[in-house]
């Protein structure tokens, strides 16, 4: 079984792009898909699974200390491991996150121990290439764009570390504003290559 870990911030459109590629009629057909959001929601049960990482953000914000955060993360890891072990197809695609931004700071959702244990064959990081004057992001506040760039930088560092620790292939796909077709093509090509 080959394991592919796909990560990226919500602003990269990772979920939508991954769904488009995996649901299209192309060479990628025999796979199991694990949505990290489903695991987070089943663990936290605080809000709608459609809100994805926000359910985990809310849960982490309510943790009393870092020990509680680590315990919640470990419980999610165990649930994810169990789900991976139940997969029967030759390719398993995990749609996940490296970090979550909380009130307390950036919290690593995945750890090097987790990656050492599961040893993915490939890590795909989807990054948003956001124009400086993007109106919809500027509406979220003056610091939002800086925060987005910082978290993408942190996630890139995590991806690089985990790839080197596990000998996984690391592919970074920039999702350019107004050019989604290129990102879809690159993601399709990367997943097709991973299946070989």
Image: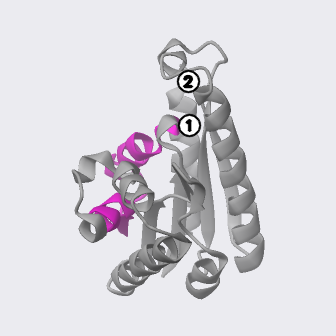
Instruction: Find residue 183 and name its label.
Output: 1
The image quadrant of residue 93 is bottom left
Q: Magenta stretch containing residue 137, yes or no?
A: no
Relative to 99, residue 153 above or below: above
In the rendered image, the residue lying farthest to the front is 64
Q: Residues within 10 Å of mark 2 (few under 14, many from 20)?
A: few
Residue 146 position, x and y percent, is: 67, 31
Residue 33 position, x and y percent, is: 36, 65
Q: Is residue 56 visible?
A: yes
Q: Is 73 on the left or on the right of 8, as rendered?
A: left
Write the start and end of the magenta stretch as one range.
Answer: 12-41
Q: Quadrant of the C terminus?
A: bottom right
Total label count? Answer: 2
Q: Magenta stretch containing residue 17, yes or no?
A: yes
Relative to 111, residue 180 above or below: above
Q: CA distance from mark 2 to mark 1?
A: 7 Å
The image quadrant of residue 164 is bottom right
Q: Residue at (48%, 70%) from the top-left corner?
A: 69
Q: Residue at (30%, 46%) from the top-left corner?
A: 51
Instruction: Find residue 179 and name its label.
Output: 2
Q: Is residue 90 visible?
A: no
């Amino acid at each position: 079984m080959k394991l592919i870990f796909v990560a990226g911030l919500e602003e990269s459109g990772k979920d939508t792009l991954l769904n488009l590629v995996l649901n299209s009629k192309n060479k990628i057909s025999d796979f199991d898909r694990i949505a990290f959001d489903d695991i987070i929601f089943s663990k936290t049960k605080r809000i709608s699974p459609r809100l994805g990482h926000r359910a985990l953000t809310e849960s982490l914000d309510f943790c009393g200390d870092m020990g509680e955060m680590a315990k919640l993360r470990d419980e999610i890891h165990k649930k994810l491991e169990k789900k991976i072990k139940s997969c029967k197809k030759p390719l398993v695609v995990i749609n996940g996150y490296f970090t979550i931004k909380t009130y307390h700071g950036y919290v690593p959702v995945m750890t090097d121990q987790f990656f050492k244990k599961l040893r993915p064959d490939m890590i795909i990081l989807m990054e948003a290439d956001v124009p400086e004057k993007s109106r919809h992001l500027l509406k979220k506040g003056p610091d939002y764009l800086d925060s987005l760039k910082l978290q993408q930088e942190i996630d890139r560092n995590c991806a690089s570390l985990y790839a080197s620790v596990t000998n996984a292939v690391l592919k970074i796909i920039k999702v350019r504003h107004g050019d989604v077709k290129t990102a879809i093509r690159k993601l399709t090509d990367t997943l097709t290559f991973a299946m070989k």
